[in-house]
Amino acid sequence: MSKMVPVPSNSIIPERDLDKIPVLETKHLGIDFGGLTAVEDFNLTIGRTEIAGLIGPNGAGKTTVFNLLTKVYQPTRGTILLNGTDTANLNAVQVNKAGIARTFQNIRLFSNLTVEDNVKIGLHNSVNSGMFSSILRLPRHWKSERAAHEQALDLLSIFDMQDLADHEAGALPYGAQRRLEIVRALATNPSLLLLDEPAAGMNPSETAELMENIRKIRDTFQIAIMLIEHDMNLVMGICEGIAVLNYGKIIAKGTPSEIQNNPQVIEAYLGKQKEG
Amino acid sequence: MNLLLNLINGISLGSIYAIIALGYTMVYGIAKMLNFAHGDVIMVGAYICFCTVSYLSLPPAAGILLAMLVCTVLGIVIERLAYKPLRSAPSLAVLITAIGVSYFLQNAALLIWKSDPKVFTSVVDGWPGLTLFGGQLRISAVTIVTILANIVIMIALTLFTGKTKMGKAMRAVSEDKGAAQLMGINVNSTISLTFAIGSGLAAIAGVLLCSAYPTLMPTTGSMPGIKAFTAAVLGGIGSIPGAMLGGILLGVIEIFAKAYISTQLSDAIVFAVLIVVLLIKPTGLLGKKINEKV
Amino acid sequence: MKKISKTTRSNLITYALVIVAFVVVQSLVAGGQVSSSLKGQLIPICVYICMAVSLNLTVGILGELSLGHAGFMSVGAFTGVIVAISLQGLPGPVRLLLAIVIGGATAAVAGVIVGVPVLRLQGDYLAIVTLAFGEIIKNLLNNIYVGVDSHGLHFSATDTASLGLDNGIVLINGPMGAVGIEKLSTFVAGFLLILFVLTVTLNLIRSRSGRAIMAVRDNRIAAESVGINITKYKLMAFVTSAAMAGMSGALYALNYSSVLPKKFDFNTSILVLVFVVLGGMGNIRGSIIAATVLTILPEALRAVNDYRMLLYAIVLILVMLVTNNPILKNGWNLIKEKLAFWRRKTPETAEKGVGADE
């Protein structure tokens, strides 16, 4: 933390985070799929407690960026610095341990397990009881199970979901499944939380509540959050910095008001939405 | 000279595996199921041919035709009765049903034909085969016929799937069932056709297998079935050229292992090759890699 | 007092079921009310229960299809025979215990050898590789000769003569299998092994490790995204499963005077898989019941001897067709929902009600 990190000139990091190492910094990040470039020259810096938005038309490569950051795909080019450390040699599991957690656009819960178990799986690396202490039901097992149970309920209370703890995750309504994914991701104790269309399928009042909760999560856990979202009210309402992606390239970066007034963005994205 | 003979015998055995593997691979491609009863259809085909020739004293050609007819019908019936109702069921349920069908065929054969082995008369008995290099290389008639049959089947199938309407429908269904249906392809009849072709080929394989190894029992189809399944996976399951390649490779490896390493351990070697290939190429030699969308 | 959770209650019922069944059978045997053919089935039933529960860990809990479970059983069986027969000086039960423990350990080693390279394959490819390994193990055992004399154990890969035994005995005789076995297995030992396997499996499932294993089953990519090491937990489930199969194998072999390698072929693997599927994937109690019923069934069908395997096949197909029939399935789900609704309405009965299966 002693060293100041040079921040790119076009950075949109909030002022309060400027003197800290950014949680994420990508340089010339790119990936090709069989000769086809899906993401190119992706440069983005996210502050330690920033809420950032990644928007763009369908097929722009937003989810691909998330997949690159979480190492579902290995980047073809470029570097990813997580809290100042290069993640080049890390796999998906190690990237999570290093501090990135995510949700999925097409919900990926452990649908046969209970809500509580889903969160406990998120807590996997913070509770420690090995296979043998569990099989022999040693005191260590009970202690860690109790801790996991309490932590899981605490986390579920963010979304007021404690009462659903015993329910099967796959049987929950859509909105609750999305919220559970966020809780599960939070359980891994990330420094950067990636949310892939968190409001998809939610009604306006649910979305409003979600916005509040995203802010609350940032404030309580003091983490950075980056979200992909098509709901412009949500994006403009809570994001401090926004990057716009089109055809795999960032076409604009800025504050919500800057983005809203950027002619290129209006042409590529917002304009299209008005027509539709 | 021995090397050449072993190679030819290997290709011949491999041709039988390849013909059986085609049935596995086509059914897998189109119905995404491991049809474990396929090996037993081979056995049924061989028994039908045996009965036609030995009991009805008809010529071998009639035996082969009747065997193909019976197996084709059997294949369609099995699909309609046992597999079709399970098309949306978990794949394990279909697998267990296929195993049930396999038990059924074996035990029905046991009741009809009893457990004592039948001595199968080769369908190419009239011709002694080729003698080359002044008697140094003797290739039996069955070996030659098997290899030729395999070549003919391979060409015919390639033309069928590439050129004909039904063949194209088959490829479309194996690519995407839903889309094929929307394009007006009758998925049910296409799947039936696949089972029919696979089972008809199984009959030919059964006759060739028993012509080369003339002991016929209700369990005759099991081991060649498993090996052909291995061959299909080795070549890349779902791929027709893969089944051919896998089958022939497997046959050659088996004969060479028997000749030069150990007769007893040949099966272990064959299966070990499969494992090594899959570790290097997880979807088989000619299989397509499928990426999961995140 | 804390409320007992649904799964705890379900597990207790499973243990109770096993213990009650054991007590009843044991008293019937003592009273001479059990036919000799059924008596002969008691140890195999225990063996198949353990096999089914252990395979369920791989197939139901980990979600990977294994078609070579009998391979691990055979490793345990043959190791167990070598251990039990070469330790002549010790009392029977101790030899049996050592045979089971060492048989299980050897099968676990085999599980690691098989699991490390192949567990990165998925779905049907993993299934075929386990099948291949099962066949390889069987093939190798067909070619192993082991003998024991005053100098210790002798191994050979060619024949018994090359063992060079000095007045000793042959334990494993190639394709003839394990010969000259002393019958050390007992029904009580079988019962204790079931309890052991059950405890290991149920405790593993309901733990941090078990949750990780099921997370891998339900969604591999999501499991990785929350920092779960896929390979580690796949291997954990697979090796535990192999070890318990090895233990069952040792108990099985020491129940006969000789055991052929052929006994542990593809068909045995399939037989156990059928128990697991019919009992319900991931449903441990179901595996126990299915293994018991389906081991007794062919015996019970002796009256129609010629047709019994044919009937077995038909029953198998019909059960699959009926349980997977969409209309019947929807109906059943509707009934379950109705039941759940009524339970929620009356919270007291919900507490006392019988827990649903896991």
Image (spheres, rainbow, N blue to C red):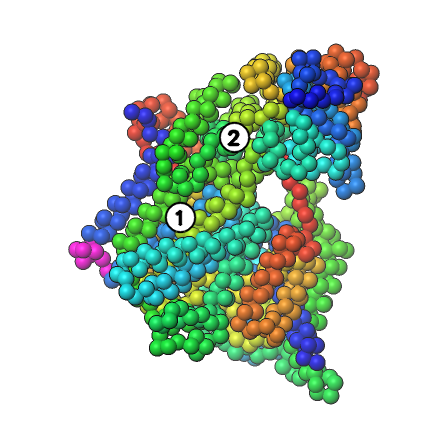
As for residue C29 lying within the magenta part, the answer is: yes
Q: Is residue C348 above or below residue C73?
A: above
Mark number, residue B208: none
Q: Residue at x 40, y 62 (%)?
A: C79
Q: Is residue C356 above or below residue A202?
A: below
Q: Main secondary structure of the magenta part?
A: loop
- Three-letter code, disc 1: Val
Dot 2, crowdedness within 10 Å: few (<14), some or many (≥20)?
many
Residue sitting at the far front: A2
**Chain part drawn in magenta:** C28-35
Check the picture and name the quadrant holding the N terminus of chain B. bottom right
Residue position marked by numbered label 2 in the rendering: A122
Residue position marked by numbered label 1 in the rendering: C53
Left or right of C39: which side holds B191?
right
Q: Position of residue C35 (x, y in %)?
A: 24, 60
On the question of residue B158 being in view, the answer is yes
Left or right of A30: which side holds C338?
left
- Three-letter code, disc 2: Gly
Q: Residue at x 33, y 41 (%)?
A: C14
The chain ID associated with circle 1 is C
